[in-house]
Amino acid sequence: MDLEIDNTKLLEILNAYKRKVDYDYNRYHNKIKDNPEEMEKRREISRVHYQKNKDKKKQYYLDNKQRVRLMSLNRYYKDRMDELKEKMPYEYEMMLEYNIIIPHPQTPKENENQVHADA
């Protein structure tokens, strides 16, 4: 299978994609967006999709409950990771395990690194 694409073929593909994006954008903003029948039809499709798949979403959250909680803790303690590490060392280790946070080298405390003038 040849994966090489020459420049003319690449330009054709990019132009076709651009035309499709422009067509979809114009169709939505000129034909669908303000049309009450289209809006109602889309709402009905969304409603049916929600009813069919709400158990799947619930199961996803139940399966990933721990990860979702850790992500929330990460957002809350975003700038205070040392505080999180002291208060909840187990959760901190779990965050490292799930790659929610990436450990960075700790900077030495100021009082340990002070240079004495008399020395």
Image (cartoon, rainbow, N blue to C red):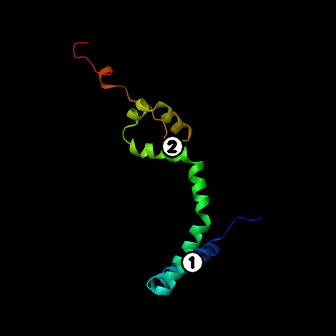
User: Residue lying furthest left in this view?
Assistant: 118
Q: Residue at x 55, y 80 (%)?
A: 19
The residue singled out by tag 1 in the image is: 15
Q: What percent of the width, then of the height, locates residue 20? A: 56, 79
Give the camera-side residue of 16 and 67.
Answer: 67
As measured in the structure, the alpha-carbon distance from the residue carrying label 1 to the one carrying label 2 is 39 Å
Rendered view: 108 above or below 79: above
Looking at the image, residue 71 sits to the left or right of residue 82; the answer is right
Looking at the image, residue 1 sits to the left or right of residue 76; the answer is right
- The quadrant of the image that shows the N terminus is bottom right
For the residue carrying disc 1, how many other residues have a C-alpha within 10 Å: few (<14), some (14-19), or many (20+)? few
For label 2, the SS is: loop
Rendered view: 91 above or below 116: below
Give the camera-side residue of 49 and 12.
Answer: 49
The residue singled out by tag 2 in the image is: 100
Q: What percent of the width, then of the height, locates residue 45? A: 57, 76
